[in-house]
Amino acid sequence: MFGRGNWAILGLAKESLEAFKANLANQTLMAGSSQMAASVVARLYGADALGFNPFGSPRLDEEQELTPEQQAELAQFSITDQEEGSEATLPAEILDGQGYGYTGERFLLHPSMPWYGLWAVSNEWKKASDLASIKEHRSYVLMERPYRFLQSTDKKTVDQETLGATTIARKQVPVLLDFNEGRVYIENTNKKLIYTIMVRLKHLGAEIIPVAWTYSQPNWTEEILNRLYEKTQYSDEFMKRAEEAKRFKPSEIEKLEDRAMEAIVANYFSMTELPGGLWAGISGPATIRLHDTTPAIGVKPATSATTLLHMTSDARVVSGVLTFQECVPVLTKDGVERIIRRDLARVSLNDRINLPDVGAALLRGFDLSMHRKDTQREIRKTKQVPSIPQFWGNWLHELSNAVRTIEGCFREVLDIGGDQEAGILPMRGPAVEETGELVVI
């Protein structure tokens, strides 16, 4: 988190807040939903399992040691469906430990906003990644010599011993719940993991709503990119830099004296001012289609994209990275006012922007470009370092603002009126089935 990443966005029913808060205060339920329990399930049953840790304690499960008997009891409780109103509970020595989090305060990001954060920890049972080292170890133990010095029959014995070697692969991702906005943000785009998190959140009372980026135009992602490119400014400057890139090495190209213009032609192949005053630049990695019937060509340098787009009259941008900027006046040390460009958000735009299998809208390659610099500047100015909840809460606030900005800019580019629904909307059709299988909606 706090840098470039891929995010899945889900809808969240605001009215489920009270049930969610009540369940966070339930010690027994939280212990059974914790990473402490999930790790035990994975170890004892050799099964994939997912549990939660509070946002401020990524490895909280490691702070409590359980006896074999306690592990077995916790694992059994965690995998058993508890009927509503059930009085099933866990021993006090488990519930009174420090290996899991409960109460709303452990997960709350802001004192007056219904913002919550947690770590979703996936424990995946899979084959060990370095089987050679396992073979070598077992060769030492079983045969008292290195694997390379074994007879073929002995090698088969060691190989057979190693065949079933497995390990638990732990992966954890941040999850942000905004009951004010009605959205869940998960820093992952794996549909199996997202679905598992959805199920576990519902178990805690959060009602999840499938959503998707929704606009009326067909191929709207491509349409946005090409409408921006058609209205780009600095076309001559882009073309000149592309011609220079054909004849010179990057180190040989003379940089422009205008630093702002140099940053534009060096990093983008399109820069367009939007009706609302923001700017949208397109950069690589991008894909360009020279003709309607030809496959798209992938490019990374902006100059290569410019060259391809000028090769045919019907060349089009298929995908690219969008950066939204604002122009801000600042005073130099000499008291002269100049305009600088501030990056607000960056996101990859392509036809994989939705994950309909689980009902998630995606932000691929998402980055709040200035967030880290702004935070560090504020620390230097105030001499105060934010608390962990403030770090998470500020990120959620900026993330939500960026999504609203992107939604608004897309509306502007596609000329969508204010009375028309567009943006991240609840999906139409049947909801995701509550089974162990993913279904296409």
Image (tube, rainbow, N blue to C red):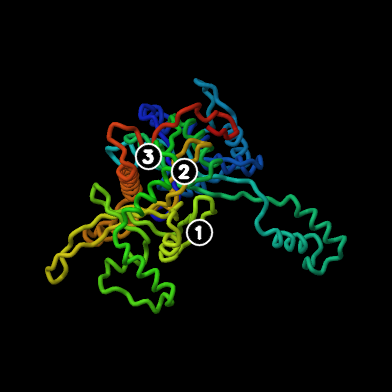
Q: At 32% from the left edge and 47% from the top edge, which residue is drawn?
A: 402
Estimate the spatial distance between the alpha carbons at disc 2 and disc 3, rounded to whole Å: 12 Å
Q: Tell us which disc is closer to us: 2 or 3.
A: 3
Estimate the spatial distance between the alpha carbons at disc 1 and disc 2, rounded to whole Å: 40 Å
Q: Depth check: give the residue in front, 249 or 28.
A: 249
Q: In the rendered view, does 237 fall on the left or right side of 130?
A: left
Q: Locate residue 44: give its quadrant.
A: top right
Q: Is residue 323 visible?
A: yes
Name the amino acid type tagged 2.
Asn
Q: Secondary structure at mark 2?
A: strand
Name the amino acid type tagged 3.
Tyr
Any mark on residue 53, and which?
2
**Mark 1 Cα shell of 10 Å, populated few (<14), some (14-19), many (≥20):** some
Q: Are marks 1 and 3 in contact (CB under 8 Å)?
A: no
Name the amino acid type tagged 1.
Gly
Estimate the spatial distance between the alpha carbons at disc 1 and disc 3, rounded to whole Å: 39 Å
Q: At 65% from the left edge and 56% from the top edge, which residue is drawn?
A: 129
- On screen, 409 above or below 311? above
**Mark 3 Cα shell of 10 Å, populated few (<14), some (14-19), many (≥20):** many
Q: Locate residue 113: give its quadrant.
A: top left
* Sequence-first disc among 1 and 3: 3
Q: Secondary structure at mark 1?
A: strand
Any mark on residue 116, and which?
3
Any mark on residue 364, and which?
none
Q: Secondary structure at mark 3?
A: strand
* Residue furthest bottom in the image: 252
Q: At 20% from the left edge and 62% from the top edge, which residue is drawn?
A: 339
Estimate the x, y position of residue 155 in percent, counting from the top left. 82, 61
Q: Are marks 2 and 3 in contact (CB under 8 Å)?
A: no
Any mark on residue 298, and which?
1
Q: Depth check: give the residue in front, 52 or 407.
A: 407
